[in-house]
Image (cartoon, rainbow, N blue to C red):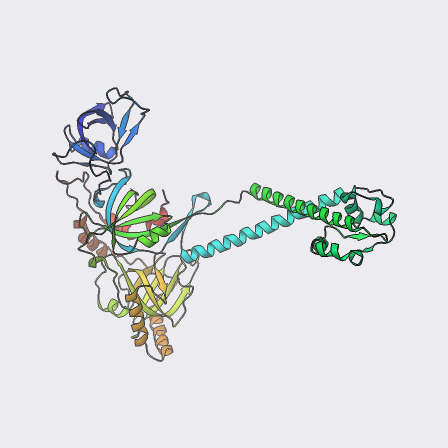
Amino acid sequence: MVLCVSNIIKEGNALEIELTDGWYCIRTVIDELLKFQVKISKIVIGTKLIVQNAELLNCDGCHPLELPNHVRLRINYNCTRRATWYSKLGFQKDMKPFPVSLGGLHSDGGGVGCIRIHIFRVYPIRYLEKCEMGKSVWRNKKAEDRRMQEWENERLKMLESINRRVSDEFEKELKGAEAGCKVNYTKLSEVKSNEVLCQIACNDPEILKVSSPFQLIYNQISKDVLGRHAAPLQNLIKMNFVSIIVAQESLSSSQLEGVLQFQQEISNQRRQEISTRVSNAVNKLTLSKRQVSSVLKTQVVDRIKETARTFTLNIWNPTEEHLQLLKEGSGFFVYNVILKSNGDFGSTSKTYFTQDNSTFPKIKLYQRCFRSISSLHQSSSRPLINEYDTVGTIVQINKLPTNQEMWLTDGNANLLYMKIYHGADTCCLLDNVSRGRSVALLNLLYCERRLTVMHAIANQCSVVTSFPQQKFLQAQLDQHVEQLPKDLSQLLESCDKKIQNAGITLEKGMQSSISISQLSSLVETTGSYSEIDDSMEDNTLIPSRLTSTDVAMSLIDTDQYFESV
């Protein structure tokens, strides 16, 4: 809706504004960013504001002309923009939230009603586990599957241990109770109680002294009774609950049937009791479930204001619908998102997407960039978003608990050194590949050449596979395999010598690939895109400029230091 500022109220350090739709007025609470706009006279009496996601406070139902003093309207910066002077006040015909330029949003400005974006990268799902002591661990899909299996095995072993301990304690209690139970009888045929018959049938030394010699009953049971109770009888004997034995005077069919039925009931009760005790023991241990959230990371650009600046949109706990809908090269209106302090956008439980089918003129500019290993050696041009895809044959793989590395080559013995600054327990990329295998690599971070080889950085968003899903990458991989020499071992040995001469070892690792001059050039090339027009015609209220610190931070995977909201 569109409202007009009818008054600015200052009470000490507190600052509020009064908004009107032309009929009614209401005092409005504003955040610090909007207060700043009032102080610099960007918002004055008579300014029209278009507002979305406004919240009414302390209102239990009252007449608009008789508002209590404690009733307030609350608006935030990210959902408020200046409207044109001729805008009609009140609710608008189109009730949907209006899209806001990505560059004009602020992390302290509250929630974002709507943004209009073009998705040009969709990365593999990552997983964030919140551990004890506030620690958080990021993992890729394979590493998470392994950790989940390990956790299930640990939990199963613990449950088995608890089950054995509880069962042993329960058996001791039963033996103690049976030892104090005495049964007196004269003739077995006169006993009518199933419970007494079971106690007589048990292998009790005191009963053995009174009764005549015992023998197993299998040969003395009528066929019809045995047919109905053979399985329960054998199960009871296997479980060592009782040893069914009788005296020379055999049990009658009705007595035997009653004994077996009673024993089956007792067996079920004991199982239920053990299960209950195990559950109670597990609850006392407070075995906590793993707190794991899945995150779908996407790279997007603004469709409202054409700039070369890119943004990250993280979808927390994505559904199958999200995975099917969010594809590279598609445009969307995204509603109800948040902007985190690190500059990334994040989804909420109320986030939803609607397709934007309008054409995007710069769609080809953000398509995937393929670089062969030989072209990396020949050209020093940097990819637009500092990422590229390539193919190659594996020469060496080295793994340590804290990092991993892989050397690749093309058919001409040109080398590419790939570094992973995570162990295999959190970034599992090299588990299904080996020396001499040709693979495709996606989402590698571009680095400057160091010595005689090219460098690349892989992380949890990267992919190493022999069967890429992208058709263009599969075609490049097939072409690479065709160009390999027949004697692959000779090529690999030649590459081994080059690696040895390069003098780069896993223990030394790869130093920072971002030089001071490179950082300066990044600021020069991206700084002009981050300038925000602060004219009256623009709805953006706060200007900002990209600094060298911003560029340096953008080259770091800061997601690992932030938790989901």
How many numbered markers are drawn? Answer: 0
**Does 199 sit left or right of 266 as displayed?**
right
Instruction: Give the image location of residue 387, x and y in percent.
Output: 27, 59
Residue at image coords 57%, 53%: 157
Residue at x 49%, y 46% (from the top left corner): 289
Q: Position of residue 156 (x, y in %)?
A: 56, 52
- What quarter of the picture does the C terminus occupy? top left
Q: Is residue 336 left or right of residue 180?
A: left
Q: Quadrant of the N terminus?
A: top left
User: Is any atom of residue 378 visible in this view?
Assistant: yes
**Relative depth, front residue between 428 and 511:** 428
- Picture coordinates of residue 111 (x, y %)? 29, 39
319 to the left or right of 253: left
Residue 310 point in image, percent of width and height: 24, 51
Closer to us: 405 or 481: 481
Q: Identify the image quadrant of residue 248.
A: bottom right
Q: Residue at x 14, y 43 (%)?
A: 533
Q: Up-down: is 289 above or below 16? A: below
Residue 505 vs residue 556, the one in the foreground: 556
Residue reaching furthest to the front: 224
Q: Is residue 556 visible?
A: no
**Residue at the image point whose x is 29% and y is 29% from the top:** 56
